[in-house]
Image (cartoon, grey):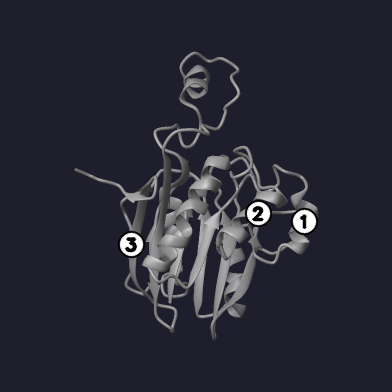
Amino acid sequence: MRILFLGDIVGHIGLRAVSDVLPSIRQKERLDFVIANGENASGGFGLTEEDYQYLIDSGVDCVTLGNHWDSKKQIREYCERAPKLVRPANILYFDGGSGSRKFLVGEKEVTVTNILGTAFMKETVASPIVTMGEILPSSSAIHIVDYHAESTSEKAIFASYFDGRVSAVIGTHTHVQTADETVYPGGTAFISDAGLCGAHQSVIGFDKAGAIDKMVFGRDAKLKIKEDGDKVVNGVILDIADNGKTTSIKRVYLINGKEKNNG
């Protein structure tokens, strides 16, 4: 099975970037299933039902979330009627929606789980390791985990611990695509961060001026999405055998639909 995982979608420019390229990349790469992290899609914080539906209509098969999962409070209601939405499994004091879902792809099942990390994060969550251990007995052989966290080492520890028990652990949250993609000996693919879908040459999807005002000059500036200019799409493509073992992981880096030129 061939699965595309898209990094954090930031703002409407990110939604458009995904919508623009997904039909062609799906055909070119012969994709069977597409997962996208949508927790920053609606104004940079959270996901509205309208934007969730936009992603589904664009060809995304599953939308995962992260620490801003409830920044748009409507999600607490609409998650019950959003069968392709996966919120963090280890959040506390909320049991709506699902933190791990099974999808039928042809004659095969794909499980998608969303986990929030703990290091340098403000949210209080249940243990990622314990939560994952509770999910595993009922998961399918092909199992993709979106590990939404700040710490690269925490993501790598989680992936190493569950090597051979899940197909892939894909890091999200930092919006910067890393170059450490690998397949561990047990057949689990890993990358620290899948990257960003949004404005190219921005500050992780946000306008540079506001970010500079806030960090350099200490002003109480509100971060704004950079909604114009070139569009970047980051992600990874996974090739997974029927037994759930990943055979390859390849980074995707497109600017306005074209592969990035590293020369």
Q: Position of residue 236 (x, y in %)?
A: 39, 59
Q: Where is residue 255 in the image (x, y as percent from the top left)?
A: 37, 45
Question: Which label belongs to residue 250?
Answer: 3
Type of the residue with mark 1? Tyr
Type of the residue with mark 2? Tyr
> Cβ–Cβ below 8 Å for labels 2 and 3?
no
Residue on which disc 2 sits: 52
Image position of 58 (left or right of 92): left
Residue furthest to the bottom? 107
Residue on which disc 1 sits: 78
Under circle 1, the secondary element is helix
Q: Can residue 119 be seen in this view?
A: no
**Dot 1, crowdedness within 10 Å: few (<14), some or many (≥20)?**
some
Under circle 2, the secondary element is helix
**Dot 2, crowdedness within 10 Å: few (<14), some or many (≥20)?**
many
Which quarter of the image is occupied by the C terminus? Answer: top left
User: Which residue is rendered at x = 42% and y = 58% of the image?
Assistant: 157
Which quarter of the image is occupied by the N terminus? Answer: bottom left
Q: Can residue 28 be seen in this view?
A: yes
256 and 124: which one is in front? 256
Under circle 3, the secondary element is strand
Q: Quadrant of residue 127?
A: bottom right
First in residue order: circle 2 vs circle 1: 2
User: Which residue is rendered at x = 61% and y = 74% of the image?
Assistant: 102
Q: Where is residue 99 in the image (x, y as percent from the top left)?
A: 65, 63
Image position of 152 (left or right of 110): left
**Dot 3, crowdedness within 10 Å: few (<14), some or many (≥20)?**
some
